[in-house]
Amino acid sequence: MASKILYDIRDKKLLRCQPEPKGSAGLPSIGALYKSARVAEDDKQYMESIIIEENMLTKHAKGQLRVVGIDGTTTVKIKPTVKITPSTTELTANSVLTIDINIQNILSIDNITSVDMRINDVNFAIDVVDGGGSMDIELQEVDTYTIECVDDRFMSNPVEVEVV
């Protein structure tokens, strides 16, 4: 089953994704997508839709897909994936943890210079060169730390590190 995506042509932001309903009804109209996404009348001129073959709802589509323009053609691609690799998953207090990231599924049009990350409640950025980057962080307190990518341009799975 297919889905229809509504996106803003100015920034290629994915606004809504609705799958084809079961039964004899077809894909939603552009008007139905406007209503569902609560698009203001003045902004409708900047909206376009595109059909994908997957059966997806908005939350899933926003988490995994992006709308891109390549060689004058607009298409939907999978978001790049940030793989987080800590130097270890268990350390002692006052130890330095090295966090390495590797970005997969990068397109030639991507210009990725940094990735927004978080460890527990502290935000930081890791600079990226040739699809990878690294940062050393000193962990002083005994705790379980969750390291995650908070940059919505990417998909990622969080990693936990325990300081004992």
Image (cartoon, grey):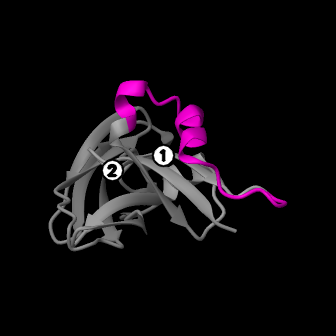
Q: CA distance from mark 1 to mark 2?
A: 31 Å
Q: Which residues are magenta?
A: 22-44
| Other residues around mark 1 within 10 Å, as few (<14) / some (14–19) / many (≥20) | some
Residue 120 image offset from top left, x and y in percent: 44, 37
Q: Is-magenta flag for residue 73?
A: no
Residue nearest the viewer, comparing 82 with 9: 9
Task: Please indicate whether residue 62 sits to the left or right of residue 55 in the image.
Answer: left
Please give the name of the residue rendered at 59% of the width and 71% of the height, measured from the top-left corner.
53
- Which secondary structure lies at badge 1? strand
Residue 74 image offset from top left, x and y in percent: 33, 64
- Residue carrying label 2: 12
| Other residues around mark 2 within 10 Å, as few (<14) / some (14–19) / many (≥20) | some
Which mark is drawn over residue 146? 1
Residue 126 image offset from top left, x and y in percent: 23, 52
Kind of residue sitting beneath label 1 = Thr
Task: Please indicate whether residue 114 sits to the left or right of residue 82 in the image.
Answer: left
Kind of residue sitting beneath label 2 = Lys
Image depth: mark 1 or mark 2 in front: 2
Please give the name of the residue rendered at 42% of the width and 48% of the height, measured from the top-left corner.
7
Q: Is 20 located above or below residue 93 in the figure? A: below
**Does residue 158 appear anywhere in the picture?**
no
- Which secondary structure lies at badge 2? loop
